[in-house]
Image (cartoon, helix red, strand yellow):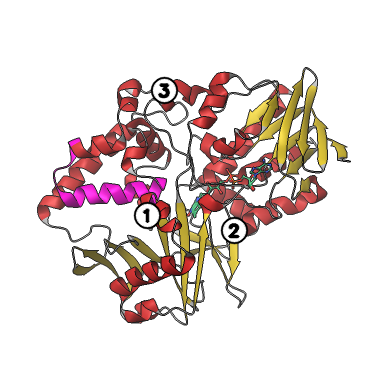
Amino acid sequence: MSERLDCDVVVVGAGLAGLAAARALEASGMRAIVLEARDRVGGRVLNHDLGNGDVVELGGEWIGPGQLRINKIVAELGLETFPTYCEGENLLDLHGRVKRYTGEIPPLPVAALADLGQSQFRFDRLAKRVPVEAPWAADQAVRWDEETFATWVRRNTRTASARYFWEVFSEAVFAAEPQDFSLLYALAYTHAGGGVNSLIGVRNAAQQDRIVGGTQLIAQRLADPLGDGVRLSAPVRRIVQRTDGVKVEADGLEVDARRVIVSIPPVLAGRINYDPLLPARRDQLTQKMPAGSVIKINVIYAEPFWRAEGLSGQVAGDRSPIKFTFDNSPPSGSPGVLVCFLEGAQARIFGRLDAAERRRAVLGSLAGYFGRRAGKPVDYVEQDWSAEEYTRGCYGAHMAPGVMTQFGPVLREPIGRIHWAGTETAGVWSGYMDGALTSGERAAAEVLTAG
Ligand SMILES: Cc1cc2nc3c(=O)[nH]c(=O)nc-3n(C[C@H](O)[C@H](O)[C@H](O)COP(=O)(O)OP(=O)(O)OC[C@H]3O[C@@H](n4cnc5c(N)ncnc54)[C@H](O)[C@@H]3O)c2cc1C
């Protein structure tokens, strides 16, 4: 026998989007019930306890000054930020040659720098022409949606170094390969995040700040005031829509409400049963927005030994499989933590290995960059987000050629009493925690307007 509840609005998913939606609804006097499949809140944000009261994040982590909504909510929730450690010199380690440098510009040969600079200038200029809330309405939308990001890179670069930069950009930002998504999607996402430097940089960019106590605290503090309005271990299986309301069926629980906000990644939204069926175009959208592939790895050392060597902990290199690292130590600087990622093709290839082999490969890369000590951590924590039942890939979703122009317009369009949230539906900072929060608030506003 299922427990039966009723409320004004059911929210599916207690990630940042769902929790922001519920918070906004409750603030306007509506009773919301959040149904969460996992036994915890946060979804793609997840803390890992280092055992000394400090944490590292296994999912979403950094925030930047351009992410206005999350900065405001972090302050409202009484949380504090601290800067990502980036003192000292970075390493560029390409083709077996190691160079130390400071600042944003890597010490590449002049021809490569010029090539990279002109291609980035062109790409950023095109990105600004894409309206973030409606990329399908860009003046050249159809043309830009016909080709992949990979073909654009090939046509707009001449040097191997510039091509390698765009490959790493694609993996680091989209967790996908340049051939996986359309140029239009790449432009829209880049514009939504303030441009290439804003997406990949630390100071004045998306990786500038971290949250004291970890980002999962944002989710927990959003959830706390909702009390038993957040129901855990309640995966939603079916949504029945009638003229006067909805019935949302989860394991062991049925909730009647006026409306529902589905705030889960598109692929997972497509795995819920809908009665009546979703319109074909909406269902096909969920079939055509695959998630990227990421394994995030925190490698823990007794101390951040690279700092004593004058290094920031930031590497860009080609010692497979790790292509970049950051210093991810807690604010106290102890223990020392390097964070790195297997993304896109690397996540798919190395995700198939057993854990010990993968660890050996990752530590081999780190030892190549930072010396033998990097190969001997005191702890090693990894999270494969593609293997997670209620995520199935990260950081967010992407679109192959043709999808944005043909299916993009239905991304946020409500289907009767069903509304859509989740970072993938955001215009600004889509794919990021900031986009998740604004998407939830936007969906709540839709519901409040619809009544
Ligand atoms: C490794 C990694 C690193 C990242 N780094 C950053 C970063 O540094 N900065 C940044 O801003 N962003 C980062 N992100 C992205 C960021 O974490 C996400 O954009 C954001 O957390 C998404 O929130 P959401 O609420 O839209 O979705 P989710 O967090 O996916 O929330 C959806 C929720 O719905 C639940 N759910 C799924 N199916 C069902 C169902 N059928 N019934 C009920 N519940 C269901 C899930 O369990 C989940 O809790 C990163 C993500 C990953 C994985």
Callout in the foreground (3, 1)? 1
Residue that carries the numbered disc 1 in the rendered image: 346
Q: Which element is circle 1 on?
A: helix
Q: What kind of residue is marked 3? A: Thr
Is residue 128 visible in the rendered image? The answer is no
Callout in the foreground (2, 1)? 1
Q: Which element is circle 3 on?
A: helix
Q: Earlier in the sequence, mark 3 or mark 1?
A: 1
Q: Nearer the viewer, residue 21 or 249?
A: 249
Q: Which mark is residue 46?
A: 2
Q: What kind of residue is marked 1? A: Gln
User: Image quadrant of residue 9?
Assistant: top right
Q: Earlier in the sequence, mark 2 or mark 3?
A: 2
Q: Are marks 3 and 1 in contact (CB under 8 Å)?
A: no
| Label 2 crowd bin: few (<14), some (14–19), many (20+), radius 10 Å | many
Q: Which element is circle 2 on?
A: loop
